[in-house]
Amino acid sequence: MKLETIEKDCYYHIYNRGINGCVIFQNDENKRYFLDLVNTHLSEKIAVLAYCLMDNHYHMAVKIKSDGKEAVQAFSNLMNAYAKAFNKRVGRTGSLFEKHFKRILVNDETYLKNLIVYIHTNPQNHGIVDDFTKFQFSSYPSYFSKKASSTLEIESQEVLNLFDNLDNMAFVHRESSGDAGEKIDLQGFENLVGHTKNIQVKDQFYQYIQDLQDTITAKVEEIDGEATFQEDNWKRPEGGGGRTRVITNGKVFEKGGVNISGVHGELPKSMQDYFGVKDADFYACGLSLVLHPKNPMVPTVHANWRYFEMYDKAGNIVNQWFGGGQDLTPYYLFDEDAIHFHSVCKKACDAHHPDFYSTYKKRCDEYFYNTHRNEARGIGGLFFDYCKATNEMSMPQWYDFVTEVGNSFLASYIPIVIKRKDLDFTTLQRDWQEIRRGRYVEFNLVHDKGTLFGLKTNGRIESILMSLPPHVQWRYDHQPEEGSEEAKLLSVLKQPKDWV
């Protein structure tokens, strides 16, 4: 969308929202601080006719009093100052607002009146409050009471002249809110709320995976003792971005990645065909990790926890779900390790439903299977997808389940690493590890839906293919010696086993 040029003495609809639709005002204190910053940065540059602060966006109707470039810079300074303070307060990093604040020239008196009404009734129209006249963080109450909590000076006389008088202004607002008569036509204003009722789940989960990434990478570095994670922050041109962390050539871990992302935009045609939808937008966030150890006695591990929303063109959610899981890929099989890993998975599942472990263990065995080899990738774990709200499980309950599984990850894997990382191994055993890694690569490139989704949504290639190990072998028709430890592993991979 081309940005409107800001010019002196012109009227504009100014608005912006949090990046990925995230919450920018967590509480009333945040909103009051934002208004204070508006006074500080903009009072000499603009006249405010109307405003409204919602949880994930704001609207303003303004008249520009200064040079247009000065006004644009003042808005940028405002949002930078607020984002810096907000991030520090809540312990987050990165951009808070979408890249450029939106501005629409208002050159019609009817449109300006409708815009003011739209801004004031926004909280009620989107179900945030039952009565827009009592919403604290809009300019409407300040027209009727000097005791209104707003600290923002409003060009009230100009607005009253626009509506002729205060009584008529109240009447027009009541009509548009549906309290009386026919609604005024408010078409043409962008719906910035859309999925407000689910912002909490989405934002909660993105914050959760940020924190979980920190926890996991810190523990991995502690166990390795030598290598540290390289961090890359990246942006996706179509919307969103992520934070990739990769560890290489460590004492314990030959290669590993713990990545988070939150991406959004128009769902690509190939994915619309896959989901059977048309003209859909999406938001997806998640944490994905793979750790490839040096010692072949230590298993490779993979885990992923994710959240997905799909929207129609009006911004309304038409579908949403959680997914994820964790699975173990050993090169030499220690039964006690497999039992430990599955026991931790079962404990996490049992806290939420008695059937979850058996159901998602079975799905894991079915999903992580190289059908072209007729063998599993590893000894499984959990795999769940399309976890949607039902009469039995709400989205917050799914959130609790998925985060419980995520929180159990280190307990499921790290004790195995500690137990096996210093065991002796031979060159032949290292060769076997690299041959089995080849099977891992085959699954990721041939069968894995996550890899497919990343590639078809223009994801970051380095992050998508981070899961591939650095040293791999493909030997023609390699067969392990009958009765060997290698053959023992293959026999289990041919037929999934119940470990707990």
Image (cartoon, helix red, strand yellow):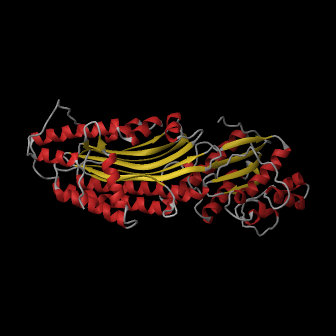
Whether 383 is drawn above or below 8: the answer is below
Question: Which residue is rendered at x = 48% and y = 37% of the image?
Answer: 457
- At which x and y percent is residue 37? 65, 56
Residue 295 in view of the camera? no
Residue 13 in view of the camera? yes
Furthest residue toward top = 476
Question: Which residue is rendered at x = 64% and y = 36% of the image?
Answer: 1
Whether 491 is drawn above or below 339: the answer is above
Whether 142 is drawn above or below 433: the answer is below
- Determine the image quadrant of residue 34: bottom right
Give the position of the C terminus as an image quadrant. Answer: bottom left
- At which x and y percent is residue 177? 78, 58
- At which x and y percent is residue 427? 10, 40
Q: Nearer the viewer, residue 361 or 238?
A: 361
- Determine the image quadrant of residue 474: top left
Q: Nearer the viewer, residue 4 or 171?
A: 171
